[in-house]
Image: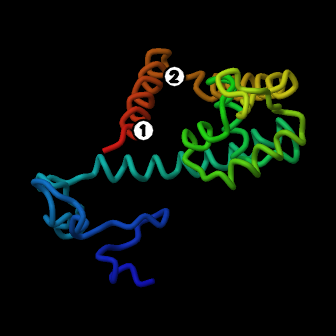
């Protein structure tokens, strides 16, 4: 598809940079130009370099995170799907829960969650138990084997962070964690 036909151009990483605000956008900046020469503009008319830089850095971080998730999943079990690693972590953090609740939290459909949970069950990483609130339903929980493997992988991952950020001031590490938490909160909240 021609990027010009979409009202923008592709930047590094394949991100579409729009010349005008999307038609669904409302509010003070709706429809205003985002481009002035070679500079992309914010709704207030100022160069929006901070947001372009943020977008570029987050795109790179997400690509690296996806690759890292594949490695983490393989470290838990060679046949574990990358997305299933996140399910294991969620079950450890959130405790036993129904498949429908897990699917809603992860933003995936029933078919996807069923396939991933089935694979994790076959690998001995999760099991099912009757839901005491509704005996017709079942709760998923991480097995001791699953918890042990995820804990080992998480400890190794934290070790990598410690080594790679060894030159950072601890306050900077804390500030990064705080800002990422704030960003995650904003991105989680519905508009």
Q: Which residue is mark 1?
A: 188
* Residue that protrudes farthest toward the top in the picture: 170
Please report the residue visible at 44 percent of the width from the left and 28 percent of the height from the top: 181
**Regarding mark 1 in the picture, which secondary structure is present there?**
helix
Q: Which residue is mark 2?
A: 168
Please name the colour scheme applied to the rendered image. Answer: rainbow
Compared with 158, 62 (above or below) is below
**For this view, does 22 lie left or right of residue 158?**
left
User: Which class describes the residues within 10 Å of circle 2: few (<14), some (14-19), or many (20+)?
Assistant: few
Please report the residue visible at 52 percent of the width from the left and 50 percent of the height from the top: 60
- Pick the quarter of the image with the C terminus: top left
Please report the residue visible at 23 percent of the width from the left and 68 percent of the height from the top: 23
**Regarding mark 2 in the picture, which secondary structure is present there?**
loop
Compared with 154, 24 (above or below) is below
Query: How much space separates mark 1 and mark 2, taking CA atoms?
Result: 28 Å
Of residues 120 and 182, the one nearer the viewer is 120
- Find residue 69 and report its horizontal and vertical position in percent: 69, 43
- Find residue 155 and report its horizontal and vertical position in percent: 73, 22
Of residues 125 and 46, the one nearer the viewer is 125
Compared with 128, 51 (above or below) is below
């Amino acid at each position: 598809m021609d990027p010009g036909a979409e009202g923008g151009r592709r930047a590094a990483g394949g991100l579409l940079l729009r010349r005008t605000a999307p038609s669904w956008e409302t509010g003070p900046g709706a429809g205003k130009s985002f481009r002035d020469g070679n500079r992309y503009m914010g709704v207030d008319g100022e160069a929006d370099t901070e947001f372009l830089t943020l977008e570029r850095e987050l795109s790179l971080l997400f690509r690296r995170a996806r690759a890292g998730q594949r490695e983490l999943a393989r470290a838990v079990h060679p046949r574990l799907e990358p997305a299933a690693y996140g399910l294991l972590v969620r079950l450890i953090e959130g405790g036993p829960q129904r498949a429908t609740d897990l699917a809603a939290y992860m933003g995936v459909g029933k078919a996807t969650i069923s396939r991933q949970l089935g694979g994790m069950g076959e690998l001995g990483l999760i099991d099912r138990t009757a839901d005491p609130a509704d005996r017709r339903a079942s709760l998923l929980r991480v097995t001791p084997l699953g918890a042990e493997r995820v804990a080992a992988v998480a400890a190794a991952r934290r070790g990598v962070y410690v080594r790679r950020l060894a030159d950072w001031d601890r306050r900077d590490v804390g500030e990064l964690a705080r800002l990422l938490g704030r960003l995650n909160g904003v991105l989680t909240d519905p508009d």
